[in-house]
Image (spheres, rainbow, N blue to C red):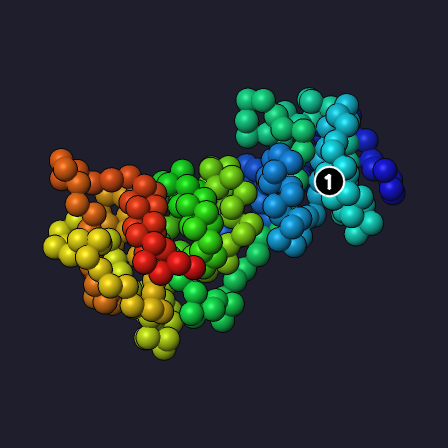
Amino acid sequence: MLGKILNITSLQNPIIKDLTKIIRGNNQNEIKSFICEGEFFLKSAFKNQWEIETLIINSSISFSIEINRIINDCVLKKVKVVSGDKKILSKLSNNKNAQNIIFKVKKKKFLFNDLNINDMHIAIDGVTDPGNLGTIFRTINAFGINNLILIGNTVNQFKKEVVRSSMASLFNLKIINTNFIDFKKWVNKNSIKLYGTDLSSENNYLNENWIFPLCLVLGNEKNGISEEIKSLCHKLIFIKTINNESLNLSVANGIILSEIVRKYPI
């Protein structure tokens, strides 16, 4: 192992207190970093060049060559790398069984200019369930879609439940946080065709000839897409079900994306 790694034994250590403060923070919009757990998350953050600020590792574990390479890189970059026992890791963990790696990573902020207009986009309007949002991250990442737009009061993408359910796909995405006015400007400026999901629509998604540049809009779990967003949509679509019951939002997202990608492979 290259470089020096500090060993921590006290829960009162300033580094532990700093991480605890972030975990317990009520206003995530004002906090500039977030906490992740596990080797898979660390590898994804490192691969996508997110800035790791603090890295806590289990002092009694021997890590793989790949993880040791990341740890060494962090040491060389003057990242705070510390080792601790299970007591330390459990203090910082969101899980009953603490992972062997916990780290603090700086949030990235993306702008509309970072998006490639010719790529496919997903917009989320007012989704409140963290598990749904995290699963949507995983789904769009699986389909090779990187552009995601969160509108209005959609749940914060860095909320711990969202991060955990995203299974590290968060690090692969360009996520824009915006409001209706700025979203409308982007849509109009770039002639984006919005396809909104709506249970009252008579347009079956299977019959759609998708027009690009394209953005699929998913709405609130209970109320769907807002009326102002609907007014921007090129087409409102629905998924026909046998019992006429609404599908889970993340499931509906996967079904529609599968059809779009089938017709127009990315």
Give the left or right position of residue 183, taking residue 223 as reference: right
Q: Is residue 64 above or below residue 53?
A: above
Instruction: Please rate how many residues cluster around mark 1, counting C-alpha atoms within 10 Å: few if below 14, some from 14 to 19, many from 20.
Output: few
Q: Nearer the viewer, residue 47 or 217?
A: 47
SS for dot 1: helix
Can you give x and y, in whole percent of width and height, for residue 83 in the image?
77, 31
| Of 13 and 43, the residue lying toward us | 43
Q: In the rendered view, would you say 205 is above or below 75?
A: below
Residue 109, image x and y in percent?
54, 60
Residue 233 falls in which quadrant of the image? bottom left
Image coordinates of residue 77 in percent, x first then y, are: 79, 52
Q: Is residue 233 shown above or below 165? A: below
Residue 16 visible, this angle: yes
136 up-or-down from 201: above or below = above
Which residue is at a point 51% across and 54% down the rendered structure image?
A: 173
Amino acid marked by disc 1: Glu
**Residue for point 73% across, 28% down:** 58
Which sits in the foreground, 14 or 81? 81
